[in-house]
Amino acid sequence: MEEIRFCPSHGFYRGETCSCGVKGEVVLSKERVEKLGKFVSGILRHFPDKFDLEIDENGWVSFEALVKIVQRKYRWANRWVLKAMVYSDEKKRYELKGDKIRARYGHSIDVKLNDMPEASEDVLYYGTSEEEANRMLEIGIKPVNQTYVHLSTKIERSLEVAGLRTKKPIIFEIDAKQAKIDGIRILKANDSIALAKEIPAKYIKKVHQYSSS
């Protein structure tokens, strides 16, 4: 976890120095970035009802309402700090538009995401373990503890994700082009993540096996 700083020329960023070489003013320490990120993602992805936060079918909530909830737990987390977390996040977990904010992916609550663009990629990737791979080749890829299956736009990203769970990752190459032709809705959450309700086994067109040893 990296601290968040502010560069007068380029705005919020994470790490010691901005891409321009300037060492900007610290906005949030590493510890506060971690605490705030976990709390906000929990609210937007999993339990908005716990705080009586109204969320629409596309995952949007009132930014000002979220600020008030966050400030009740962390007095230092004003709207400027919350925007710093959103704009500096290289993984683009959140989307801020006008007076609304949402998580782009990772939901366990039922969201439709109807206003999210469709993924343009013809090929997508999914990383898993050997044990899970055998089952998925039979029944397809279904979400576990989440509303959507999370696919990667690049094989390197799927390797990174799978590598967190296993030393011998299996990477599926998904025929996204045919899946979309057949009516499967695949959404583009950000540059590296696409979402689908499920991927039937017939769209797994290649299996790549790797080992970290």
Image: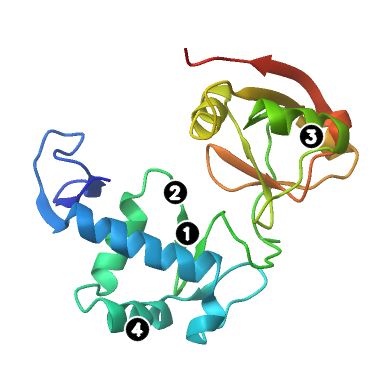
Query: Which residue carries the number 1 mark?
Result: 95
The kind of secondary structure element at disc 3 is: helix
Secondary structure under tag 2 reads loop
Q: Are marks 1 and 2 in contact (CB under 8 Å)?
A: yes
Work out which residue is located at the far bottom of the displayed protein and give it.
52
Which one is in front in this view, the residue at disc 3 or the one at disc 2? 3
Q: From the image, tell me which residue sits under label 3.
A: 136
Q: Say which residue appears at 58% left-offset and 77% top-offset.
A: 55
- Label 1: how many Cα within 10 Å (few below 14, some 14–19, many 20+): some
Above or below residue 30? Residue 19 is above
Q: Is residue 85 above or below residue 176?
A: below
Q: Report the disc number at residue 92.
A: 2
Residue located at (67% from left, 66% from top): 111
Left or right of 11? Residue 177 is right
Where, by quadrant of the figure, is residue 107 drawn? bottom right
State the count of labels: 4
Sequence order check, earlier mark of 1 and 3: 1
Q: Nearer the viewer, mark 4 or mark 1?
A: 4
Residue type pointed to by label 3:
Met
Tell me if mark 2 has few (under 14), some (14-19) or many (20+) residues whose alpha carbon lies within 10 angstroms of its own: some
Q: CA distance from mark 4 to mark 1?
A: 18 Å
Residue type highlighted by circle 1: Glu
Question: Which image quadrant for residue 106?
Answer: bottom right
| Sequence-earlier tag: 4 or 3 | 4
Residue for badge 4: 68
Q: Secondary structure at mark 1?
A: strand
What percent of the width, then of the height, locates residue 72? Answer: 30, 84
Residue type, numbered disc 2 = Lys
Question: Which residue is found at the position 12% from the left and 54% from the top?
Answer: 26
Tell me the crowding category of disc 4: few under 14, some 14 to 19, or many 20 or more residues within 10 angstroms, Cα based: some
Using the image as rendered, state which of residue 46 and residue 20 is in the foreground.
46
